[in-house]
Structures are given as C-alpha cells and as structure tokens.
Amino acid sequence: MDRTADRREPTMRDVAALAKVSTKTVSRVINGLPGAGAEVTDRVRAAARTLGYRPNLTASSLRRSDRRSATIGVLFEDLSNPFDAALLRAVEDRARHAGVLVLAGSSEDDHTLQRELLVSLSTRRVDGVVVMAVGGHQDALQQERDRGTPMVLVDRPPTFGGTDCVTTTNRDSSRDAVLHLAALGHRDIAFLGDRRTLWTSQERYTGYLEGLAQAGLTLRDALVRTDLHGADLAETATGELFDLDRPPTALFTAQNLVTVGAMRLLRARDLHRHVALIGFDDFPLADMLDPGITVVRQDVPGIGRKAAELIFARIDGDTSPPVHAVVPAALVRRGSGEIAPVS
Amino acid sequence: MDRTADRREPTMRDVAALAKVSTKTVSRVINGLPGAGAEVTDRVRAAARTLGYRPNLTASSLRRSDRRSATIGVLFEDLSNPFDAALLRAVEDRARHAGVLVLAGSSEDDHTLQRELLVSLSTRRVDGVVVMAVGGHQDALQQERDRGTPMVLVDRPPTFGGTDCVTTTNRDSSRDAVLHLAALGHRDIAFLGDRRTLWTSQERYTGYLEGLAQAGLTLRDALVRTDLHGADLAETATGELFDLDRPPTALFTAQNLVTVGAMRLLRARDLHRHVALIGFDDFPLADMLDPGITVVRQDVPGIGRKAAELIFARIDGDTSPPVHAVVPAALVRRGSGEIAPVS
DNA sequence: AACTCCTACGTCAACGTTGACGTAACCGCC
DNA sequence: GGCGGTTACGTCAACGTTGACGTAGGAGTT
C-alpha cells in the first residue's frame, strides 16, 4: 500500500521528527551512548523501527574522530584459486568478529591492476589492507604503505621495511621434502617451480638446494625447471625430463598447478607408480588419487588468522616493530612421496 | 624527512589552497568536468600529485545526487568453497569493468548471519547485492528487497516476487544424467542428495524422478538418501546402500561433497570400477581419478557474469520485469558414468 | 540560601564533497 | 552600444552524522 519502495532512505532527522527529539539524541540512542532517558530511548527505538531506519556508516565515519570505515581491503592474486579463497575466508571470519567487512579483489599478478585496486580501496578509505604482492617490484605497495595505510603482506614478504607479513616455512619444508626423498634412496630428484620472480619460488628452490647438499647429492642443472606458470607448461617440462638419458626418479613440484601438470604427465606415461612425487601445497582429493599425493601442506587458515590479527592490531594503533610471522607447513605422506627408486 | 606518515589525509581544500583556486574548481578537475581552463587544470593536477591527494569516495557519494557508493555486496554460503569462489571471481571481474568494488561475506547457511551481513552491507550503502540465499524462509531477503535494495539471487531462486535470479538447469540436467545411466542398462539408480531445504536439492531430485519415469524405471525408496550435508554423511549413506539385498548399480550424487563421499566409499570397497557414478557439479582433478568422474558441469563463470549484468542493469535503473535466467549445465563424460551394470 | 554536581537533553558547526546558482570577462552580431 | 551567449571561475548550502559545548532542572552539600 504505502510501501516506501523507491523513496529516500530515512535519516536520523526523520527518526528525530517522529520521536520528537533532536537528531543528537537519536545519535546517542543508536550508538548506545549515555545521556538518554529510558522513556526517550524507547520512543527513538520505536520510531527507528517503524521507519526502517539504518544508520549511514559512510556519513558516520566521515564525521567521527577516528574516521574508521570498519572495512578492510583484501587484495589477492586470484580469488578463484583455492589457496586464495581459503585465505580470504580465514580473514573474513576474523574480520566478522571485529565487526569489519572485507572488500575483496584479484590482482592477477599484474602491477597495473594491483595499483588500480589499491587506489580504489584507498579512495573508499579502508582501514587497512591485506595483500598478496604481485611478483617483481613493490613500488605501488610501498607508496601506499608510505601514505600511512596499515598493511600486512601474506604469502610473500615485502621488499621494503616497516610492514608486517605472514609466510610459511617455504625453505625448511622444501628441504625436508627433498631429504624425505633422499632417505628413500633417490639420487636424481628434479625441481619444478613456478615463476622465478616469486619469492616463494626462490625460497622453495633454495630449500631444494639445501636438501640436496645436506643429503650429499650433487645438483644436476638438467633436473631443474622453473618459470612453469600453469599446469600445461609444467606437463611439458616434466615430459622433457623423462626424455633425458638419465631421467629423475623423484620430482619435487614447488607449486599447486605445477604438481597437477606433473601428475598428468606421469599418468600419461604410466610412470605414476614408479616415480616419486612430492608437491608443495595441498589440494582437494590429493588423497583420492592412486597413489595418494604426498604434499607439503600449508596451514592456510592459520596464515589468514594471523594476517587478520596483525592488521587489526595495527589499525588499533599498535606501533611495535614490524613482525614477520612464519606459520609452519607439514609434510603429509600419502604414497607418491614414498615410492623408492627402481634401480 | 618530512614524510607525512601519520598526518591527516590531504583534502580538496588542501589542493585548492596549493593551486590557489576554489575547492569547486578542484572538484571539476578531479571529476573531469568542463569549466576549468587548461592552465588551471594543470596547476590543480600538479598540486594533487605533490600532496598525494586521493578523493574521498564516501564523502563524495554522500553529497552526489545519485548516491552511488560504487560498491556492491556479495553474500554467498562459503567463500572457501570452490563453487562460491569461482562465482565471486566472475562477479568481481564484471564489477571491475564497471569501476565497482565488491564487499564479500559468507552466510554459512545461517539465517542470523545472513541477516547481520545484509544489515552491514546496507549500512555501508552498497548499490546492490548478489545473494546465495540460505535454505528455508527468505524473510530477511525479502525485507531487504522491500527497502529498495537492488538484489539478484544466484543458485537458488527467491520465494518472493520482483527479484531477478540466475540458476542452472538443475532439473533437466539431472534427468539427462539419469537417462544416460538408464541407457547403459542400469535399472537400480540411487539418488544421494544434500539438505532438502535447498531448492537445488529438490530440483535435482525432481529431475531424478523424471528421468526414472521417462526411462520406464520404478522408483525404489530405499535407493533415495537425502539430507547428506558433507562428505562424511554421504560416505556412510552410500555404504548403507551397498548393504542392501539389491544394491544400486549406479549412483547419481546431487552435490559436490556428496560426490566426494560416495567416491570414498566406492574406493574403500573397491567398487569404483564396477558401480557407475555421475555427480552434479564439476570439481578439480575429477579427470585425474581412475576412472574419471562423469559430472554435470555448471557454467559457473556464466552464472556469475549473468548475475553481475543483472545487478548492474538494476542499479542503472532498469525496471523491466524480473528475470529468471537459466544458464545451461552440460554432462561431461569421463568414465565413471559410462560403466555398464555387471549382471 | 547559595553552591556544586549530575543527568538529560538541545544547538551548532564541521567532516569532504558537489549541486545550484552567481558573476565577471569576453565574443559576436546587428 | 546594447543584447544574448559562452566560458571560467567562485560562493554557498547541503548530504547524514557526531564532537564540542550549552542549558535547564533536580539532587545533594554546606
């Protein structure tokens, strides 16, 4: 009937008029501040309800002294990637408890896009940002940081100072994976990695080298393949490894999609029961494959929780020295990493 | 040195003072409106750059006549679920092209949480919302809709009128899956479904019934299991099916996690090469399993794109009658759905 | 009785921006 | 020389809210 379908949103003024008080008193009631009597409080509440009043947070945060928008930005590489999605979810859970909402975006590992999204977030006056930095230089991030925006990096550390970050035990876990393979007798362990511009790739490669050294194995350059962005490139590169005179007997795949590509090739050549495989990053159904895929599993919820805690602490004015939190990853044995060399 | 680390953000007034013009002129330059001379424009741009000025979108949208926040809300069940994550990504891509950012939240299929998140979004004056409705009543959604918030539902239609939605061919594709199994000679086809409160579950069950009828098969109630929320329940239920005197020779699993649970049991009892399986919803690595899992694949990016298009059209004032868009799903044959009955 | 203090309100201005409107200067044209 | 039109600005108020501050009335204290 008198549905206020497309009318203006009710404001404090409307509520005040209906309750016959001043807007300031409405403000007090809505925000639960003292200075409003019981009877007036009831009147205001009733008026707000009948009008369907919702406070306007943007106007409120414009005027308030703390200027909080109760919103943070989350800028990951690709929100449809399971790793990123799980991370977002963990941050979101923590944010909810702080009454904060999350503005989310995908940078697609593109500097321009990352910069544009940072500006969009800053223009909306988010209280802080959680960022998975794109590879290469971090000028845009540093610039944003220098403007005073609270910032926490995840998965990859900053190349500039003064900023918190949360990463996993990339190097140590990679070394452990290689040692695990070496302990089974493998001497020809290949490394397949993602783009070298990524810090995680570099760390995992360093861990691989440390593992070889610690096991007394010599590095064979022919068994190292990097810059494999995507499963297809990984599959091709894996194929080339097995065309070598002395092919590897074990593979260490240093990223999600690289693992998938390698798996595809092993299956295609019916090698999956004879060549050992350990991948970095867990993925759904890894246990349902035959053999199950042994992986280094990151504690994704743990990383997200920690990142959220850090950003909220900074937003709340914590000025202690920047933290580099490291959340441990663990080797999950499922079979593929426990295959002994044939010879 | 004179880094303005923790100082106030520069405003139009600051830029205006530096460029020796009025704030209104700064506004014109920043928004690219006519009425500013070339020389003044340059001065303002230079001043904005040196101060690191960023327009305050919240103040701007408060004052502007259209009141747009250039932000939409996305309220899905669980952002860490691959289906939801892919959908979010599709919406986000479309939003980016419209210069709009996405506030994302997970309702966890909980009415209270959904309502709270809707209020949070409305409080931040989002221009519209894309919602995956929680099961059961939709009072909160309808209430929000009645306030005038542009809204599009995805995956599940509204139980109230006047609202756009985007779903897939749940019923038809389920019927096709059952017919596909029947054509191979299966007569005992089981149905395993998620919570019955979900519209998608009901539709897929109806499709199952239609398929049986069209194939001239009779429904065996013992082969129908519903309310399987999560892989564990699905695994148990599947086990019980194979304890029957006349167990099924084929399974139609009507949801993601249900498929995984059924697969687990088939493997545990070494039935996976002898019992046919078709699942609703594709998932990563379905092709890497042995046998590959035949699925009904939804066009998730297509659904997200369509939902985004609809919400932006409504925000732009489109008042044409509400649309129920249906994005077709397709059967992807991978082996598990092509196993013939043993007898 | 005069004082202090407290409670429960109200008034006013301001947050950063833009719409409505004003105005001065200039151009062109009869 | 007067008129209308255009361009390039500026002034002012308002968007919805809250901080600073004012005030009336009552209670308690001396």
Image (cartoon, coloured by chain):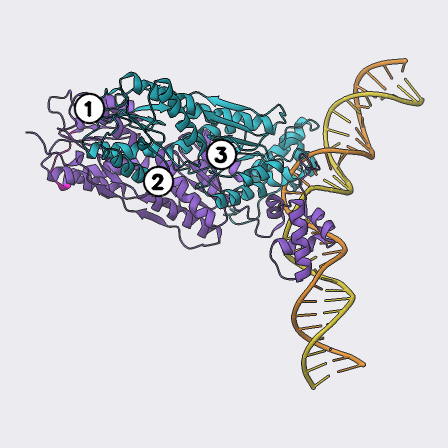
Chain colours: A cyan, B purple, C yellow, D orange
Dot label at residue A315: none
Query: Mark 2 — on which chain does it sit?
Result: B
Report the mark closest to the observer, 3 or 1. 1
The residue pinned by badge 1 equals B267
Distance of label 2 from label 1 (alpha carbons)? 31 Å
The residue that appears at 7% across and 29% down in the rendered structure is: B342
Name the amino acid, label 2. Answer: Asp
Q: Which residue is mark 3?
A: B117
Look at mark 2 in the image and give the residue it sits on: B155
- The amino acid on which the numbered mark 3 sits, given as a three-letter code, is Leu
- Residue placed most toward the observer, B102 or A17: B102
Residue A340 percent coordinates (x, y): 23, 19
Mark 3–mark 1 Cα distance, whole angstroms, equals: 41 Å
- Amino acid type of the residue that numbered disc 1 sits on in the rendered structure: Arg
- Which range is magenta? B214-220
The question of residue B51 being in magenta is answered with no
Identify the element where label 2 is drawn.
loop
Task: Determine the image quadrant of residue B337.
Answer: top left
Quadrant of res A258: top left
- Which sits earlier in the primary sequence, circle 3 or circle 1? 3
The residue nearer to you, when weighing C24 against A115, is: A115
For disc 3, the chain is B
- x and y, in percent, of residue A91 in the image: 48, 29
| Dot 3 crowding, Cα within 10 Å, few <14, some 14–19, many 20+ | many
Q: Is residue B266 above or below residue B159?
A: above
| SS class, disc 1 | helix
